[in-house]
Image (tube, helix red, strand yellow):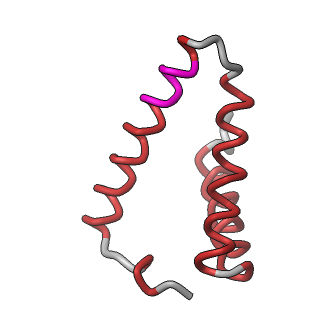
Amino acid sequence: MNEKLQFGTEEAIKIQNFAEQTLEEIARRANEDGMDQIGLHSAICVCAVGWLKNNVGPDRTVEMLKQLSIIIKEENKDK
């Protein structure tokens, strides 16, 4: 497991903000080029999961995805 992926709440927020801003810029530029947004975001997700698998291992990646799916379901249970 890559220990560099261990960080506190403040650092996690900074990283998330950076990632969101970067993704918004990529999406804006891709949209200007007429690229399919769902295809773009799906490809980014696949690449991110592959990166995680290669850097933290498949077991931890699966656990992270399980936790993410629980959060998504909980945040959207009334919708």
Based on the displayed image, in which of its 4 quarters is residue 53 positioned?
bottom right
User: Which quarter of the figure is the C terminus placed in?
Assistant: top right
User: Residue 75, image x and y in percent?
Assistant: 59, 47
Q: Main secondary structure of the magenta part?
A: helix
Is residue 26 shown in magenta? Answer: yes
- Horizontal side of residue 16 vs 61, given as left or right: left
User: Residue 48, image x and y in percent?
Assistant: 62, 56
The residue lying at 67 percent from left, 48 percent from top is 45
User: Residue 50, image x and y in percent?
Assistant: 70, 63
Instruction: Give the answer, above or below, for where 3 lies relative to 27.
Output: below
Q: Residue furthest left?
A: 10
User: Residue 37, image x and y in percent?
Assistant: 66, 24
Q: How many numbered badges does the structure rendering display?
A: 0
The residue lying at 68 percent from left, 75 percent from top is 63
Please give the range of residues in magenta: 25-30
Instruction: Give the answer, above or below, for where 22 lies relative to 7.
Output: above
Is residue 24 shown in magenta? Answer: no
Q: Residue furthest front?
A: 33
- Horizontal side of residue 32 vs 52, given as left or right: left
User: Which quarter of the figure is the N terminus placed in?
Assistant: bottom right
The residue lying at 67 percent from left, 81 percent from top is 57
- In terms of depth relative to the viewer, which is nearer, 36 or 70? 36
- In terms of depth relative to the viewer, which is nearer, 26 or 62? 26
The residue lying at 72 percent from left, 40 percent from top is 42
